[in-house]
Image (cartoon, grey):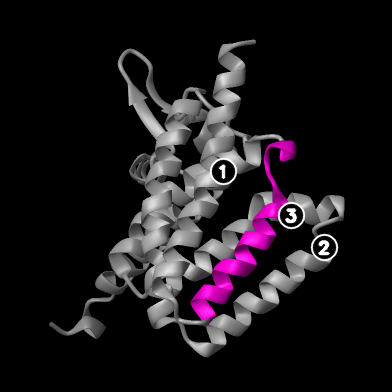
């Protein structure tokens, strides 16, 4: 086929690429709106309102909404339609239990596969956290972004694409949603920073068993904090 003689094919490809880019941009914008609470948990998804707000047609918007369903940020309910998920305390406990097992495995694999430049990047990251953790903005950063930076880098260093996919999609976004929308008082930045340093030391020493054990214990601490909050709520 002579493409030069058929410029319509070029136009079709351009339109297709434009649609893909628009959908990806919409997914990013909608994820941030849900995670940050701009789109309230439990609220119904209105396609006309979103199309107007983002100034897009319904086609790319529907594709973006389907992708958000795949990420576990939107669910469909009978007689209601699509709505933003609500993370109940019980769901969070389940989420952290899965995270504990999978990130423990990621830490073990990272101890085996991590490269020296990745270790140096993690060291610099923890230095940044240590320098700013006593500041209000620093604590806020750690609560919302910094903690994920550390875990994300270790997950990537596992070199296991299946594990990376499981942890960096649905689990990652739902945990970000919880972190953004929960009070900073529920976090424990100083304790977490100390635990991060021990985890990194185990990974640096290529101690796979210790790295996994420390990561599981670290995430278990957050899970137990949520369980305590559930217990207090039940007895209040």
Quadrant location of the N terminus? bottom left
Q: Residue at x 36, y 63 (%)?
A: 105
Q: Which residue is mark 3?
A: 190
The quarter of the picture where residue 221 lies is top right
Residue 222 image label: 1
Q: Residue furthest right?
A: 135
In the image, residue 234 lies at what x, y percent? Answer: 56, 13
Query: Which residue is at the front of the view, 146 or 226?
Result: 226
Query: Which residue is at the front of the view, 147 or 105?
Result: 105
Q: Secondary structure at mark 3?
A: helix
Relative to 204, residue 26 above or below:
above
Q: Which residues are magenta?
A: 184-204
Q: Is residue 144 visible?
A: yes
Q: Disc 3 or 1, which lies upstream in sequence?
A: 3
Label 3: few (<14), some (14–19) or many (≥20) C-alpha neighbours in 10 Å: some
CA separation in Å, label 2 and label 3: 11 Å
Q: Which residue is mark 2?
A: 132
């Amino acid at each position: 086929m002579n493409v030069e003689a058929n410029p319509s094919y070029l136009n079709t490809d351009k339109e297709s690429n434009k649609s893909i880019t628009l959908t990806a941009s919409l997914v990013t914008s909608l994820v941030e709106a849900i995670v940050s609470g701009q789109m309230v948990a439990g609220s119904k998804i209105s396609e006309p309102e979103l199309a107007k707000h983002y100034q897009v047609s319904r086609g790319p918007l529907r594709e973006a909404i389907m992708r958000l369903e795949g990420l576990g940020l939107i669910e469909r309910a009978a007689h209601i339609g699509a709505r933003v998920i609500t993370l109940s305390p019980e769901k969070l406990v389940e989420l952290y239990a899965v995270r504990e097992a999978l990130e423990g495995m990621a830490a073990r694999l990272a101890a085996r596969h991590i490269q020296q430049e990745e270790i140096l990047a993690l060291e610099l990251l923890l230095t940044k956290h240590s320098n700013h953790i006593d500041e209000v903005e620093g604590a806020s950063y750690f609560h919302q972004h910094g903690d994920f930076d550390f875990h994300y880098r270790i997950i990537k260093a596992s070199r296991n694409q299946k594990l990376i996919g499981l942890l960096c999609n649905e689990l990652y976004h739902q945990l970000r949603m919880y972190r953004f929308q929960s009070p900073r008082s529920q976090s424990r930045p100083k304790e977490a920073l100390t635990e991060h340093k021990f985890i990194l030391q185990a990974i640096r020493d290529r101690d796979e068993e210790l790295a996994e054990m420390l990561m599981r214990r670290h995430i278990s601490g957050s899970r137990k904090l949520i369980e305590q909050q559930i217990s207090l709520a039940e007895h209040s």
